Image (cartoon, coloured by chain):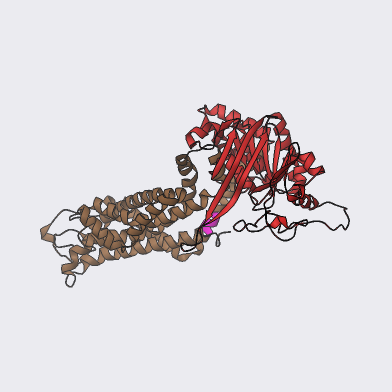
Amino acid sequence: MEAIVTIENLRKYFDIKKSIFSKPRKVKAINDISLNIPRGSIFSVVGESGSGKSTLGRLILKLIEPTSGKICFEGEDITDLGSKDLIKYRREMQIVQQDPYNSLHPRKLIKDIVGEGLKIHYKLPSDEIYVRIKGILERVGLREEHMFRYPHEFSGGQRQRIAMARALVLRPKFLVLDEPTSALDVSVQARTLALLKELKESLELTYLFITHNLAVVDYIATHVTVMYLGKIMELGSKDEIFSNPKHPYTMSLLEAIPSVGRGKRIRKIPRGEIPSPLDPPKGCLFHTRCLQAMDICSKEEPDEIEISKGHLCRCHLYS
Amino acid sequence: MHNEGSNVISRRQLLVEDWKHTLYLWRQNKLAMVGTVLVAFFILIAIFAPLIAPYDPIEVDLSQTLLPPSSEHIFGTDQFGRDIFSRVVYGARIEVGIILLVTVISGTIGLAVGITAGYFGGVIDDVLMRITDVFLSFPNLILAMALSAMLGRGVFNAIIAISLVGWTIIARLARAESMKIKSLPYIEAIRALGASNIRILLLHILPMCMSPVLVQLSLRMGSIILTAAGLGFLGLGAQPPTPEWGAIVSDGRSYLVEQWWISTFPGLFIALVVLGFNLLGDGIRDMMDPRIRR
């Protein structure tokens, strides 16, 4: 499958300066990541908080500047484009954010929130804008009369639909979904995911789906990337990763999916908390919590190993 | 469609409820009511000055000099035979003009500097805020005196001087607001849509900074009058024969012992109006406080 987005050796370091006297330190939020997102896929990125998955989404959309590396959209290098040249790619790539309560401007009517993109990119007569806003709202399951309300009059699920309408009104090809359902009730989550799946098919979209919920990944994703402290631990098709996980971290994440009626099995849940990204472990990033850690793990960092075609894993167990 | 109709009504009802609540809070706050009445009087006097004032505020009548308060001249007359009451009434117009212009000018400068510094951050923020600090490091009246001495005498120069002193607090407030708002997800979403920085600043951040800035501006109106009167008294603001209150007080200062009325009445008006604005400002601040509101 042809890749819509390609990332090569992408890095993003944040400078942390506590006071003028201390040495500035670097947080490696994204540390040498390369991947291809195939057109038409639902490419999910999973990991605990602090693993850099949201940063990855923002880097691809060029909402933040990478420290080094290369980002290509449909084969064009967009890494060094300024805001003027980037504007045509803004139509192609959009984002739906995590928190529906802070992602809509509280003082604007829904028609202005959703119509903003049209006003930025096209000089359209107002009745044409109206028709398009109405069309996209109906597409995500809202009605014409909702155009003249404010965000506070809607529920979380409805707000998330408005955020989707805002992103989709420009007819993008690629959508970054940053934990789009994590702030919603379970029943609303299910409906929102079904809508996303349906929109993906009918509008021929590609998703970068950022989440920490593997049950959601199981339902929606075609590809899975497991991130830990800014690096890819394992990557492959969803079916491969779920049926044949290789990395101990992936295995423990899969073990940790809650389900009803599993009985009292001792689960291989990782010990402790994710280490501070300010002070990442030497060697394999995961060895401090790994249940299968060996001597070499604390000394040498493992390389990415191809387990089977398209299935990569970064672990000493397979080298 | 029925659904929409009922919602429109409920929104209007909400707005009415909100106003009713504000009115209720205002009634509870006696001092705010006193302030409102004082400020309302002041503005009415300014609007209807030609109807209220019995004499021309500028015309000299040397047969009527230094008359004490009487039924003909209720506040007495000054050394040029001008009716003090008429001068004070017309002076209200000048004070209102000063307040409006200073508020608009200092509000505009403060907002522009503040939201720019807060939004862009980094070097732009450092430069703009150090400039603000320079203005803040002098006492208000001293800086206003220095500026109006530099610009030359006259009401308009005094207005510019007071505005240049007053914008700093607005700038700091607007900077804090814009720093807070720029990091919210909806601004990021608008950036992802391709909006330029100017568009984001003017259409999305500026409207969100307005309400705290407006409250702050209303709180500062009292001190604007004080500074203007101070400049007028020192001879740096309004020039004779303009009936600016501070200048009238200054006119009477060599007659203070024998002809006390020249300085006393305009002084009293300055005190009452400043008091009114301060009480009203405190009241507005309390009413806007979300801990007091529902």
- The chain whose colour is red is A
Q: Is residue A283 left or right of residue A87?
A: right
Asked whether residue B21 is drawn in magenta, I would say yes
Q: Is residue A220 left or right of residue B219?
A: right
Tell me residue A32's x, y (percent): 61, 45
Q: Looking at the image, which residue is at 46% across and 62% down?
A: A20
Q: Which residues are magenta?
A: B20-24
Q: Quadrant of residue B76?
A: bottom left
Q: Quadrant of residue A201?
A: top right
Tell me residue A278's x, y (percent): 59, 57
Tell me residue A231's x, y (percent): 65, 48
- Is residue B24 placed above or below B256 in the rendered structure? above
Quarter of the picture containing the N terminus of chain B is: top right
- The chain whose colour is brown is B
Q: Looking at the image, which residue is at 59% across and 43% down?
A: A10
Tell me residue B142's x, y (percent): 27, 63
- In depth, the one of B247 and A140 nearer the eye is A140
Asked whether residue A211 is drawn in magenta, I would say no
Q: Main secondary structure of the magenta part?
A: helix
